């Protein structure tokens, strides 16, 4: 989906909509009570920010916790190659599972005001609510160029 402003010229670069996706089907764990990478290491993907200066980020996780009264929490952070940190992981609107049974959850978030042409990297982050082990059986990230508002 291209974004246009009055007076813009039609170019191949403006017609291209950047996107990237990555999935991880290997089970991994998290024991940190602050947002961090899972035990298997960094899980991320990157795209070039389109002329709109905006992207859609989608994440999905199938997760559980070792305790019935503790949570496994998943969110993401986004970093720009020019601007640095542009979005931080938070428990607000995160994927939260407080059970020993696997649940598969997803969310979609629009990031705007990004620097056109920079590389934006989205990294999945996880934590547990208290001393326990969170298990992540499936993880997915997609980034898509978004139209201008």
Image: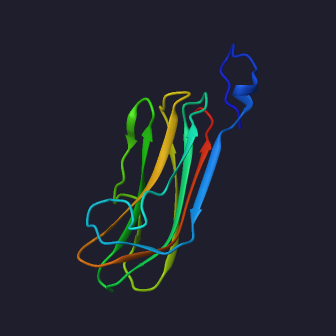
Tell how many labels: 0
Image quarter where the N terminus lies is: top right
Residue 14 is situated, as x and y percent measured from the top left of the image, at 70, 27
Residue located farthest toward the left when viewing the structure as drawn = 131
Which part of the image, by quadrant, shows the C terminus? top right
Q: Position of residue 13 (x, y in %)?
A: 70, 26
58 or 6: nearer the eye? 58
The colour style of the image is rainbow
Taking the spot 49% from the left edge, 78% from the top edge, the residue there is 103
Residue 106, relative to residue 18: is it above or below?
below
Q: Foreground residue, 71 or 47?
A: 47
Which quadrant of the structure image shows residue 40?
A: bottom left
| Nearer to us in this view, 90 or 24 | 24
* Whether residue 20 is situated above or below residue 130 in the rendered picture: above
Q: Is residue 145 left or right of residue 67?
A: right
Residue 127: x percent and y percent? Answer: 33, 66
Q: Is residue 103 left or right of residue 15?
A: left
| Up/down of 64 relative to 37, above or below | below
Name which residue lies at 42% across and 61% down.
41
* Residue 132: quarter of image: bottom left
Q: Nearer the viewer, residue 57 or 7?
A: 57
Considering every residue shown, the one lying at the far top of the view is 7
Which residue is painted at 28% across and 67% down in the image?
Answer: 32
* Image x and y of residue 82, in percent: 43, 29
Q: Is residue 87 above or below residue 41?
A: above
């Amino acid at each position: 989906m291209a974004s246009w402003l009055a007076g813009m010229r039609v170019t191949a670069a403006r017609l291209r909509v950047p996107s990237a996706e990555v999935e991880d089907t290997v089970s991994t764990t998290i024991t940190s009570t602050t947002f961090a990478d899972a035990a298997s290491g960094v899980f991320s993907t990157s795209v070039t920010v389109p002329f709109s200066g905006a992207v859609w980020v989608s994440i999905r996780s199938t997760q559980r916790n070792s305790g019935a009264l503790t949570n496994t929490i998943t969110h993401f952070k986004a970093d720009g190659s020019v601007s640095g940190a542009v979005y931080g992981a938070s428990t607000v609107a995160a994927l939260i599972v407080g059970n020993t049974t696997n649940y598969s959850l997803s969310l979609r978030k629009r990031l705007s005001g990004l620097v056109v042409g920079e590389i934006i990297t989205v990294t999945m982050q996880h934590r547990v609510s208290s001393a326990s082990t969170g298990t992540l059986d499936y993880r997915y990230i997609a980034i898509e160029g978004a139209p201008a508002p």
